[in-house]
């Protein structure tokens, strides 16, 4: 069993290192890798080999999760290019974006307080649209090698992901 | 994880919540956000002709620690000069509120917010 742990996730999945990804090819390769390194196949192997297979399977899963998610994939591409997305440390966001975030929070809180599921569903649809637009923008910025701006887009997406969770929680709370 | 009493006090009875009127020349507004947790903080200072902060208000969407950090810093900056306000460190906030390590970023957000508010005020007043 040989496995190159130093290879990038893209190489592991035989995909070009870019934002646009062939989701079907990704899934197919994932299934092939899973089958190849599944721990069951090494049930009768030695301890060292079992451990190695488990490490590989874990790595395959991690790489798949990263490549599948636009946000994680964008962040990973930036990491490969040596750019830190500063999601933990950089609090300076464009003012209009942050104002927008405040408004989102207010609207979600309002709809949640009144248990208005229809309104929450509408907000969810609107948010999906915004996330889609921002993901497309992130892809364009990465393709154009505008990495600092791409890092801002990643940070923005992180906010939207949080909103998505909040709307989900609010719908859950209103329904049950 | 249990919040400290001071966090709970500021969270349950936040000081200085709200906004000043838009377009007021004596106001500086700072807005910051923490991508990792989605917290958004708006902090405003009202500065007197003598350069001393007379009043401060905030609006924060986030966890208890973020609300407590903003509430505390609005209390602290009142009566301070802009330079004094800038010298407040997140570690002081974290210490006062006994924030656990995972919540330190909330105090950083408050420090960054006051810095942004001072910068905004200074930009307005060249």
Image (cartoon, coloured by chain):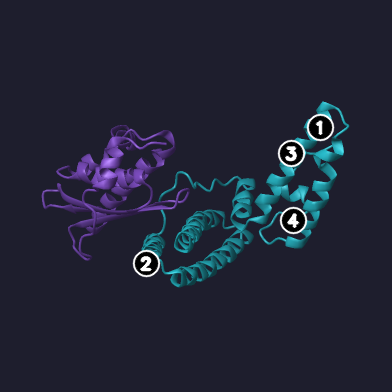
Chain colours: A cyan, B purple
Distance between the Cα atoms at labels 4 and 3?
16 Å
Callouts 1 and 3 in the same chain: yes
- Which dot, 4 or 1, sits closer to the camera? 1
Q: Residue furthest right?
A: A44
Front residue (pair A100, A143): A100
Judge left or right: residue A112 versus residue A34: left
Distance between the Cα atoms at labels 4 and 2?
48 Å
* In contact (CB < 8 Å): disc 4 and disc 1: no
Circle 4 sits on which residue? Answer: A16
Q: Position of residue A105 (x, y in %)?
A: 39, 61
Front residue (pair B4, A2): B4
- Which dot, 2 or 1, sits closer to the camera? 2
Q: Quadrant of the N terminus of chain A?
A: top right
- The secondary element bearing badge 4 is classed as loop
Circle nearer the N terminus (3, 2): 3
Mark 1 falls within which chain? A
Eyeballing the image, is B28 above or below B13?
A: below
- The secondary element bearing badge 3 is classed as loop
Residue A1 seen anywhere in this rendered image of the structure: no
Circle nearer the N terminus (4, 2): 4
Circle 1 sits on which residue? Answer: A50
Residue A85 seen anywhere in this rendered image of the structure: yes
Eyeballing the image, is A129 above or below B32?
A: below
Eyeballing the image, is A150 above or below A44?
A: below
* In contact (CB < 8 Å): disc 4 and disc 2: no
């Amino acid at each position: 069993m040989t496995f190159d742990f130093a290879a990038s996730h893209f190489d592991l999945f035989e995909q070009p290192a870019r934002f646009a990804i062939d989701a079907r090819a990704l899934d197919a390769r994932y299934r092939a890798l899973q089958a190849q390194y599944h721990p069951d196949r090494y049930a009768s192997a030695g301890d060292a080999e079992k451990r190695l297979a488990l490490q590989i399977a874990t790595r395959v899963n991690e790489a798949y999760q990263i490549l599948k998610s636009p946000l994680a994939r964008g962040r990973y591409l930036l990491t490969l290019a040596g750019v830190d997305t500063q999601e933990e440390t950089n609090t300076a966001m464009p003012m209009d974006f942050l104002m927008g975030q405040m408004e989102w929070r207010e609207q979600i809180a309002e709809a949640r307080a009144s248990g208005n599921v229809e309104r929450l569903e509408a907000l969810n649809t609107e948010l999906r649209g915004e996330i889609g637009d921002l993901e497309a923008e992130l892809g364009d910025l990465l393709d154009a090698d505008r990495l600092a701006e791409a890092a801002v887009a990643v940070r923005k997406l992180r906010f939207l992901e949080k909103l998505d969770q909040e709307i989900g929680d609010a719908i859950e709370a209103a329904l049950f | 994880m249990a919040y400290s009493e001071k966090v709970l006090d500021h969270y349950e009875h936040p000081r200085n919540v709200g906004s000043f009127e838009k377009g007021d020349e004596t106001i500086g507004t700072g807005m910051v956000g923490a991508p990792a947790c989605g917290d958004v903080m708006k902090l405003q200072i009202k500065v007197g002709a003598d350069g001393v902060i007379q009043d401060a208000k905030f609006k924060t969407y986030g966890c208890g620690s973020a609300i407590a950090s903003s509430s505390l810093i609005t209390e602290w900056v009142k009566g301070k000069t802009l330079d004094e306000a800038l010298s407040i460190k997140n570690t002081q906030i974290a210490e006062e509120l006994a924030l656990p390590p995972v919540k330190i970023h909330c105090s950083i957000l408050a420090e960054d917010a006051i810095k942004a508010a001072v910068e905004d005020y200074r930009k307005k007043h060249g």
